[in-house]
Image (cartoon, rainbow, N blue to C red):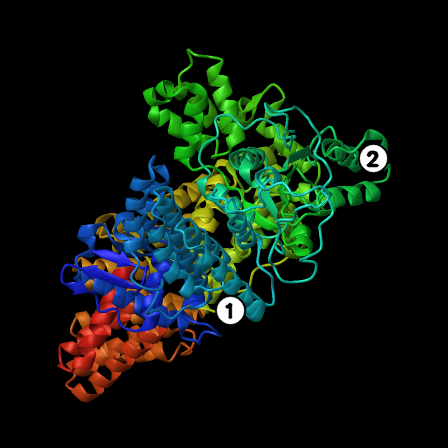
Amino acid sequence: MEFRLLGTVSVETLTGPLPLGPAKRRSLLAALLLSANTPVSIGRLTECLWDDEPPPQARGVIQGHVSRLRALLAGADAEAYGVELATLGDAYVLRVPETLLDSQRFEELLTLAREQRGPADAVLMLKEALSLWQGPALSGAFAGPPLRVAAHSLEESRLATVEQLSRAYGALGEHHRSAALLTAETAAHPLRESLAAELMLALFRAGRQSEALDRFHRTRRLLADELGIDPGHELADAYALILRGASGPLTGTVLPEAAAPQPAAGVPVRVTGDGPGADGPGADAPAPPRPPLPVTSPSHNGEPHPVDLLPRAPRGFHGRAAELAALSRSAAGEAPVCLVTGPAGVGKTALALQWAHRNPALFPDGRLFADLRGFSAAGEPALIDVLREFLLALGVSPRRVPESVPAAAALFRSLTARRGLLVVLDNARDSATVRTLLPGGADCVTLVTSRHRLEGLIASDAARPVPLDTLETDDGTALLAGVLGEERVLAEPAAARRLSELCGGLPLALRVTAARLAGRPRWTLAALAGELADERGRLAYLDVDDTGVAAALRLTVQQLPPGAVHQLARLGHHPGGHYDPYAAAALAGTDPVTARAALERLAAAHLVTETAPGRWVLHDLVRLYARSLDPASAREALIGVLDHFIATALAAAGTAEPGGEPCFVLPEDYRRPSAVQDFADRAEAMRWLATEREDLALAALAAREAGLDDRAWRIILLQWPQMVWRARDSWSPLLELALESARAGKDAYAESRVLALLGWVLTEEGRTTEAVALLERSAALAREAGDPLGEATALINLAIVQAELGALPTALENCARAVSLARREGDRHTEMLALQHLARMHLTARRPAEALACARAGLDLGPEHEEAARRSLLLAVCGEARLALGDEEDGVRLLDRAAQEAERAGYDEGAVRALAALLRVSARTGFRRRHDEALRRLAEES
């Protein structure tokens, strides 16, 4: 089995390609493969499948395509290849070994090519990589905006590979092959200047100089006619090199003047985009001479070295291949500003210096560096001091350095106007400071690092962001090995990985950990991992001298306004892992608008990360630091967020199951949040319960540990719509925690309610004997607590189990008593539920007339729009009762109606039940098809 994106989107098998069907299904497959082994939300898939406003039934269309795709994969024995299309909450994930995906093999071959020592081996790898392409990427799919971006990115990677193969041919002296390869590509991409430049050089080196010059002029005219621009520096450099008759490689920047022929005295040479032979204003005018570079130290031939203020390259640098490549891409173009952003300790400076030291040829006139100390306790340096250092390095006499910042900045821009320089501005706090220090030359690159996103710099100067995240576990382990030695890490590989995980992939934390171990050769990695596992002391262990995670975070926090600091401190006390504005407001005692603004401010400082619109997370080490900011507020914050969960879960349950009786009264000291999230419909409410399931469980556990048992069992019990809908989804442990909390508070009411739900779940899990004991206890406790509706619920659940065990008379008696209790309390929802099960039990007891009467009574109680699933079950009983009474026509009509209502409500279990009853008396193919589709959907959801 092979999955293809590099051409027509397809799945190849031993028997040929799978019949994927319409373009939107191919789009769905492409979207899942582009994020292989990662969940893709329904929202993201909708963006991929529709170019404009999606239809109201978009979710259903996607589910249908997923269902068909899953069936196709199953028919091709995908499981044997380790392929699985799974549902995860409100998302889908296509689990597939990377070796089965052509785009992944393409990337692997490129990596192998880069690792080859000789060009001949690199050529083999690159040719094999390009052979995987069978047409434009993602062909045959309907390309919504995200897929168009992905296809463009894949095509860019292919073209870069073609250029790389051309250079490898050139290294072997096979310039004719290089020219042949590039000729075809430039015909398809005539405006791609890098391709044209490579072709010009290949033709020139193959002895076809006139063709090379003709290619330049054709491309120059095309750029002018189509885009209204002059050739960029790559084309101009290639053209200048050919005119000189040189044979060196194209560096991608203006060549150093030392490499150019020396002109006659007083006639300077200008090698830029409008260089020798170029048309346009000023092409024939001599350029003013460039300011002299300072002679910092003479070389062996007496020529001055370019200026270089860079600190040494970082030691023990590991990983970051993708980010280094992103920096190289960002540094292309005219006067680019590259912006490396990320949280404290993530390695922004190390990345910037590593890239700068790896690319010296790009900057023939040198490299400048300034630490702007935007997050330092020592404070920021004066701008005039930074500019003075730059100007002195560029050869300006100390007496000629202007005293004002504007004048010094203007002189700096003037001196750099015709240079090829790199300017590294490290630890910038704001955009205004950076703007003052930007060089003036089109061939200058500015590399900025910051803990802030500096969105103003992106808006004003088209800065290209390169966000930096934490290290993967393998790269973190490699960093440890670089400091400690491979032998020590290889001796304890599991402990090394654990240390990387405990440090959260933060390079600063990893280096501090390595420093501790390096100074203590007798310590084992496992022993230190054990120490770090204790959250209470982890930050203390990650401090060495004046370097540490807490110190770095403290300097970031000092730059924040008080409201953001208050929000961060309260976030540290959240028991779960995710935050939305409502939860953040409950923690901080504010409102969602204020909380959202604080979260945005924290995100700009890279202290929280937005993982989805309106949903943020905290790095583990940041969470520990945040918790230390205001430890006295822990209980208040916890109670606030617990009450938020109770309020929101009540709203979700009320929307998901309208008309239902609340399963408890609120705690005496309950504090209603300033705002509670609204849910538009049942689907949105159920989605919130599913998304927050893990955090709700963590909140209940934290409440139990804090002695807030009255909150713990309520938070768990309020998830009952999700538990009933997905009863076989391992709810027992959570309900047992709720039972412990109820019993700890000696609350008979709470214990009864928890036992009723736990008994239901155990019944669905097949643990009927245990369920009977719990449900009998639940009914007795409800009577003791004076809770007739709780008793009715327990009796309904008990009757269901008793009916399954064959004790039908007892089951009928208990269910009838539940009907009476609910009717006496005036609770139509519970009465309807009891009548539904009583009708089913009468049908099982071969009493169709009684079953029909109960079902009709139940239907008379509930409004259609609120009880769709329950109406379906009651209609099914009516249909089966009619069949048993000999009225086949009416029975079939009612069962078909029951199935349709279940299908509309997304209640597949009810649809299967009604359609199975229909198939026992009818052979219609439509019933069989609908039954099989509902059954398949049910299997996918389980």
The amino acid pointed to by label 1 is Ala
- Name the residue at 69% across, 31% down: 376
Residue 423's tag is none
Residue labelled with disc 2: 401
- The disc, 1 or 2, on the residue closer to the chain's N-terminal end is 2
Residue 860 falls left or right of residue 262? left
Q: Which of these two is toward me, 551 or 419?
A: 419
Disc 1 crowd rating (10 Å Cα; few below 14, some 14-19, many 20+) is few
- Name the residue at 36% across, 45% down: 168
SS for callout 1: loop
Does residue 295 sit above or below 89 in this rendering? above
SS for callout 2: loop
Q: Which of these two is toward me, 105 or 451?
A: 105
Disc 2 crowd rating (10 Å Cα; few below 14, some 14-19, many 20+) is some
Residue 105 falls left or right of residue 263? left
Residue labelled with disc 1: 680
The amino acid pointed to by label 2 is Val
Report how far apart the C-alphas of labels 1 and 2 lie in the structure.
Answer: 65 Å
Does residue 213 sit above or below 773 in this rendering? below
- Name the residue at 22% across, 64% down: 71
**Does the image show residue 36?**
yes
Residue 433: % across, % down: 74, 43
Image quarter where the N terminus lies is bottom left
Image quarter where the C terminus lies is bottom left
Residue 814: % across, % down: 28, 62
